[in-house]
Image (spheres, rainbow, N blue to C red):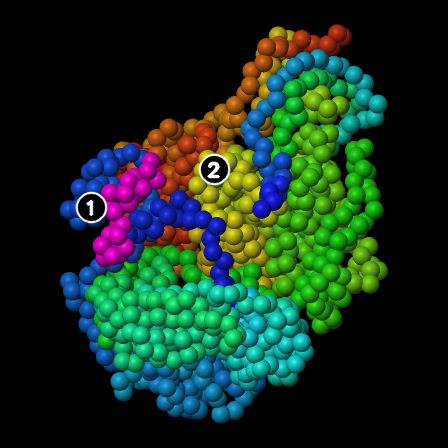
Amino acid sequence: MRVTAAVWTGGDRLTRPPRERVYPGERHCELLDCLIQPRTFSRLLEWAEIDPGELLKCISEICRDGQVEHESLVLLARDARLAEVRQALCPWASRAKGKWQMEVSRERLDLRDDPSVVSPPLLTQPIYACATVVNVTGYVPNADLDIQIDGALAVIGQPGGSPFPFGATVALPAALVAGQTVEARQRVNGVDSPFTPPVVVRDHTQDYPSGPPRPEVFPLSLYDCGVRTGVGNLLVGCDVRVTADGADRGSISGAINPQGVNLAPALATAERVRAWAKLCDDPSPPSVEHTVQDAPSPLPTPGFEPIYGGSDLVVVNGIAQGARFTVSRNGTAIGTYACWGGQCRVGVSPPAAAGENFTATQQLCPDEPSSPPGSGIVAPCSALPAPGVWPVEDGDTVVVLTSFVPGSQVKVFVNNMKVGDGSGPAVALTAPIPHEATVHVWQILGTCEGSTVQEVTAQCFAAAAGGDPSGLNLFPIGTHEYDGGQTTIDGFTYDVRGSIYYPAEDDGADQPFNARLAALGRVPIVVCVHGAHGSGTPSYQGYDYFQAALARMGFVAVSVDERQTDEGPDWSGWTQNIVRRAELALASIAHLQQLDAGDPIFQGTMDFGRTGLMGHSRGGDGVIAAAERASLPGVVIRAVLSLAPVNSGANSGRPRGYPFMTFLPAADGDVVDNNGAEFYDGAEAAPIKTQLYIDFANHNYFNRQWTNDDTGGGLPIMSRPDHERVLLTYGSAFFRFALRGDSTFAYLDHSVVPQGTQNIHHAFEVDDPRIVDDYEGHPITVDNEAQPTSQLGGLAAGIFTFSQGGGAFNSSFFGATLGNVCTSKEGTGSFREPLSGTADLGDAEVRVRAAEVFDAPNLPAAPTGFRIGVEDKAGTTAWIDVDDVGGLPRPFDRRSFDSTTKTMLSTFRFPGRCFADEERNLDLGAIVAIHLGLDRGDGIAIAFDDLEIVKT
Amino acid sequence: MPTDAGQPLESPDDRRDLWRLPEILEIRPLRRRLPNPRRLTVRGEDRYIEEAVEIEVTVSEPFAIRALGPTLWVGEEPLTIAELVEPNRYRFLALNPQSLEAGAPIALSWSARNAPRIETKYRYEPASGDEAR
């Protein structure tokens, strides 16, 4: 199963902070979605009173390509020739979001809705000993649920009710024991689904040796008179209780995650609230302490999520935590409910009908007035959209939904045959999805059957929807400002100081180190080094969010105060300034060793043999230098993350001996050359190096103290929280893998995409690949295996430097390597690279880095691509298109800002199985050559490097 | 209602124009024996020099503190390592003094590959006794 987002870690589902602003790129894609999905487009035009001319004008301004006149767009839209409009506009967006997915009318399809096909539901995993409940999701609304333990039915026919929002809590006859197996199935209209695959019950200390994770009270404000709250980050089956000023106010035995808890008596202003969890009598640390506030008066007006005719539930939003809210239907009250805040579900019977009017008010204290009423009008069933679907890969056994209407039933069809019947956010299938299958996903809401379905083409490779590698919240966070005296470097005298975030007994400054964690051994450390931003800015405090995330999961996270290196006499030294930054960071590590040797908080806590470095800007150059200069006894640098670095010559330019990661903000307005690409090219994969080229990211927003947009508004920039999310998710995955051996590698080789990240283009390389060609040390006429290459079908290939300066194909390359640029004006050109002997691709992938070459000044309107062919001994060749493994991204357009629009290569994975699926006669065990194929006939050059075969 | 004086939400550091360069007011080449050996790092390797050829530049205002540093161009030779000797006066160190050509035009830029160069009215003239060409 490729679904990894099974565990809600608290905090972001209901309370995700609003975006600072919708940045144009995202807006662009949203608008393109409108065009791609005719029903949505039509609905927007007709119901939301959007003027089509203004909409299209907006799109054409964003696209800037100027390929289509505005008037033509309007005419096309009025003619409903939406496909032509879509094709004419910004095709890169349609390439990214539209090719593999399209909302289509159900009427024209011959979908066979076989009632005997019912999906197994999903069991929330892991399942731990001592749990007295299990959590079941993904079932058909109102299905009956059976639970089987060790092969025997233990629960029969429990009504599941609505699977929205967090499924059903199924009580078990006895607490679970480690080693037992648990399975679940659903029954719909008398038809039993298959059971889920058995889940083996684990002892929670296998995964949480220092005790259950720390509960999270929903981070919405707690208010006077609140009667309910939500608690997340729980192990399913645990006991949870909520206290106010130390006294119990509510508890649940056998909780799911998240869990609502009713509070009695109600909260009172100034009370201090915490949540506590326990499993097998093993207590968690307490949650963060929250202080109850006076309720705002009046409370905000509640709203409704879209309601469609036929629905048997409505979702009210904008509810204050702990408030009571009253829902009325056509003016008649249907009930008053308690809510943990944010969105709350209310069942309605009979189902809603088009045109009905639902209203809601909310209230906290009885002596305060209710909020103004908010209303929601029921839309007709015909407006019910198709669900959104995460990219589907050949062989998938689960379809993950990116959007669905709460309470809907979701049916999945493969090549018109039904293979799934369940509900969001994921539907298990009764059979794996075959190669290049057409998948249709349809949602039904009560009596309303959606008139459209989402049509999806299964891809050869599609990164799976992942969870949040930064969401591991285990410990309270202690903070400490250290002062290690002074050190002198090159005649400059510096204070050795900075901040430490660490796993503690409780939150706050100088709290004791977490005793249970310390008893398990020393913990790894991560040292952050900021860049130059002026000595008046406390730049070292700007990564506090990252330090806090690392501390929560059990790392010591340090940020070195290097402001004194930002002062003019020092800063102007360029290379030497960065060397001094590196050595000041090492001076801090030396001081940390002193703390570890005898400090009351930190004695015996830090494992300097597992030290990671994260540097930003000049600090990104500096941390590579620091790794090369680290000679402190006992200090071993195990990982380096270089974020938007400069490249001054302060280091060798060849990071080696540790996993290396670099971030390249595509909209960097300061380090406009994205020098991290040079470090990536120079780095050793030990055992991995990875590069993230991040569209819409600028230089500064990764540091909370750097408040200005370094592009000065010259480029579209994503929000600051989106920047931070990239560092949080990928940085956490990187250090967890490199320093602690956690199973987060899949985020580094792009097998899995973290929640909430997008528009990131990965390059990566693992150790010990079979290098077919890296275009180094030999002419284009042979490959790395000394075999003679061939340029076929009109294709022209050549080796060029992929860097600035002499020997480059053009000025758009900013790396530090050599590569192959191919062009072909014909439809079927290929570059054949023979192997020395044969290769078995049975359990292997062909990987290649590639990019569309940006040829200034024009950025073609249409996207391009390539394909990879593998040829066996008999001369049979099978081809897989890059569009089938994710698609070739368009160059990030910086033309309105400067002259550094780049050709930046990404790594593509072509699994061997796909070639075999494509060509049955192919002998996958006897591959003798690999082809780089250019089949678009558009004359656009493609840059290639690092053609490899990698065992999987 | 009394008038609030207002609270800036950005520091002056955050309002600078990253790409602004000061005007060069004066240029003076120097060859000098350093009071203490100076460390120079090239591709991560340290070496120490005791004598330096430098170009002392007086500018109209300080450089903005940012990731990139200023580059003084002598013809096509970039000088990136500078020392602030007093406000608005910097000494740019020539790592390869033999490559400084007499009469070469002097320009200023930021240390990005294609950053625009601001040409100046100055040309390089070696200091007296300078061994550079």
Residue A681 in view in this figure: no
Q: Residues within 10 Å of mark 2 (few under 14, many from 20)?
A: few
What percent of the width, then of the height, locates residue A817? 51, 36
Label 1 to label 2: alpha-carbon separation: 31 Å
Question: Residue A45 in magenta?
Answer: yes
Q: Is residue A129 left or right of residue B83?
A: left
Residue occupied by mark 2: A713
For the record, the magenta segment spans A35-64
What residue is shown at x 26% (from left), y 52% (from top)? A49
- Count the labels in the image: 2
Give the SS element for disc 1. Answer: helix
Q: Which numbered marker is on residue A77?
A: 1
Q: Could you say where residue A413 lies in the image, as x and y percent from the top left?
A: 25, 68
Residue A446's place in the image compared with A843, above or below, is below
Q: Secondary structure at mark 2?
A: loop
Along the line of sight, which residue is nearer the eye, A27 or A378? A378
Name the residue furthest front. B1
Chain where mark 2 sits: A
Q: Quadrant of residue B3?
A: top right
Q: Position of residue A749 (x, y in %)?
A: 49, 54
Nearest the viewer among A410 and A369 is: A369
x 45%, y 85%: residue:
A170
